[in-house]
Amino acid sequence: MSGNTIGSVFRVTTWGESHGPALGAVVDGCPPGVVLNEADIQQALDRRKPSTSVASTTRKEGDQVEILSGVFEGKTTGTPISLMIRNTDARSSSYDALKDVFRPGQGDFTYQQKYGIRDWRGGGRASGRETAARVAAGAVAAKLLARSGIDVIAYTQAIGAIAIDRGRMPAEKNLRKSVLANTLFCPDALAAAKMEKKIAAVRKKGDSLGGVVEVIVRGCPAGLGEPVFDKMDADLAKALMSIGSVKAVEVGDGLATAGLQGSQTNDQMNKKGFKTNHAGGILAGITTGQQIILRAHCKPIPSIARSQQTIDCRGKECIIEIHGRHDICVLPRIVPVCEAMVNIVVADHLLRQKAISE
């Protein structure tokens, strides 16, 4: 199985399945001397764990990270950093009745078609559980970026049809504090309260919801990105689209630009720099020095308790209802995953630029 590695200089390979003994990541290419310990990584992993939010699963994994290599006396050594997270609360027997059935909206059918075999215990490698390894690796990237004054922050922009009110957004210096102030990682407290009510109502119906994660990169210098096929926005879009639930990615004004005119979307300049940021901090695949603005659109969780028609592995039609421990919405838990993937891509491009400028 290829396709488990991302990055050119700062390279991340993830491994493991939802119901296996453990999962993890190997980070290669991180420079020596970066201050790093398990607490730095744990802080990010704790944000991904199920919370008291009505959107979260009841599966309670401790997600305690272990650094197996690449760190000595609290600093990276420049050698591969191996990270492991043990699975401690998997209940594989809950999937016994589904092992021969293709669940709608899941990767069961496609994995079977591609490999002729699949791990039916929670989706195996296709499970959202895999993203814990991404978050661990992203925390390493964040420590590297912090040395250059680069900060990545993600938050819930919308759940279902309920979106934040830009007029209620906090001042930039208070953004992270506001994001962490509620279990949905939403900087608009009023919108967050409405989202909680909507999620609770949908849960009672046995259904699920989608949403939008917004990601902001602050302090990114101009000049990062490798045209033409490794453009910064192209790599960011690929990284976010590699997350199982993400179905679309916007950069800057994104989809709205298709209905506008050039005079409305061009970012004009004066002596002080750019007057606007419709482009989302990237032009011609290279960063402009402004904030990078991204939005990841996530589909509803496919595991729902409502009756759905499908087929089994012999092609026989059947009706299933999926019960058990599942999120109702990938937000808020996908928020730190999006943040991690952006950290990894920006870290990679930062090191690529340093390689040609030093």
Image (spheres, grey):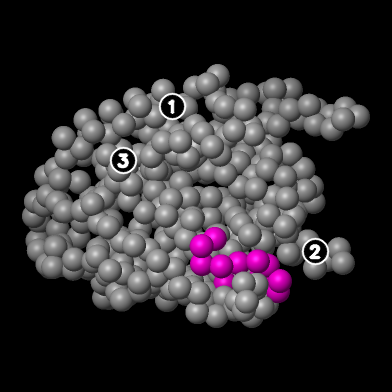
**Which mark is first along the chain, 1 or 2?**
1
Cα–Cα gap, marks 2 and 3: 42 Å
Asked whether the residues under the numbered discs 2 and 1 touch, taking CB atoms below 8 Å apart as contact, a structural biologist would say no
- What span is in magenta? 27-40
Residue type marked 1: Ala
Where residue 354 is drawn, which disc sits there? 2
Q: Which residue is mark 3?
A: 53
Outermost residue on the top side: it is: 167
Between 319 and 345, the one nearer to me in the picture: 345
Where residue 88 is drawn, which disc sits there? none
Badge 3: how crowded within 10 Å, few (<14), some, or many (20+)?
some
Which residue: 20% across, 60% down?
102
Residue 231 in sight here: no
Badge 1: how crowded within 10 Å, few (<14), some, or many (20+)?
some
User: At numbered mark 2, what does the secondary structure look like: helix, strand or loop?
Assistant: helix
Does residue 187 show up magenta in the picture? no
Residue 270 in sight here: yes
Residue type marked 2: Lys
Which residue: 65% across, 48% down?
151
Asked whether the residues under the numbered discs 3 and 1 touch, taking CB atoms below 8 Å apart as contact, a structural biologist would say no
Asked whether the residues under the numbered discs 2 and 3 touch, taking CB atoms below 8 Å apart as contact, a structural biologist would say no
Residue type marked 3: Ser
**Which mark is first along the chain, 3 or 2?**
3
Task: Name the quadrant containing residue 191.
Answer: top left
Tag nearer the camera, 2 or 3:
3
Q: Which residue is mark 1?
A: 189
Task: Give the quarter of the figure containing the C terminus.
Answer: bottom right
Outermost residue on the right side: it is: 271
Q: Can you give x and y, in whole percent of width and height, for residue 320 in the image? A: 11, 52
Q: Can you give x and y, in whole percent of width and height, for residue 19 in the image? A: 27, 70
